[in-house]
Image (spheres, grey):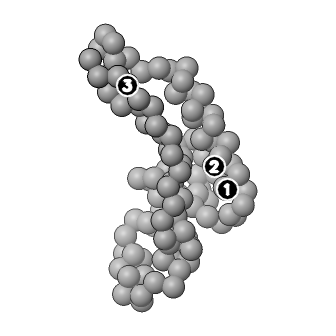
Amino acid sequence: MRPRSTTSRCTSTRGLSGAEPDAVAHTRTTGVNPAVLDAAALLIVGSREQHVYPGVAGHEPNLAQGRATATKISAAMKIIRDATPGSGSYSNEADYFVSNEGDYFEAD
């Protein structure tokens, strides 16, 4: 049996602020939140636990650890949201527990 590992990470990549007009125009046609068009950076904070299968002996998820990690990630995201009012997300990279989903998610 392979040992399970849990990984938490924060990833940053370039936003579209200052990007070529064609790139910005194309992005406007996608499901990405329009806030990315003026963003200098995109930030993803997340975690995962590999080789986890509910109901499979020896591969059950560690729920206590998962809840603790979710609490830490939520705290980190609160700092980021407080520092970046008006920022948002799109569903593929979303915080499913956000309380202001009407402002946070883009929907047209």
Residue 25, percent across and down?
39, 83
Residue 104, percent across and down?
58, 57
Q: Which mark is residue 81?
A: 1
Q: Compare marks 3 and 1 and give the one earlier in the sequence.
A: 3
Would you place residue 2 above or below residue 45 in this image?
above
Marks 1 and 2 sit apart, C-alpha to C-alpha, by 6 Å
Identify which residue is drawn at 29% across, 22% down.
2
Query: In this figure, which residue is indicated by the disc labeled 3?
Result: 4
Image quarter where the C terminus lies is: bottom left
Q: Residue furthest left?
A: 1
Residues at marks 1 and 2 touching, judged by CB atoms closer than 8 Å: yes
On the image, which quarter does residue 50 sit in?
top left
Q: Give, as a three-letter code, the residue at label 3.
A: Arg
Would you place residue 72 above or below residue 52 in this image?
below
Q: Secondary structure at mark 2?
A: helix
Left or right: 70, with 86 as reference point: left
Image quarter where the N terminus lies is: top left
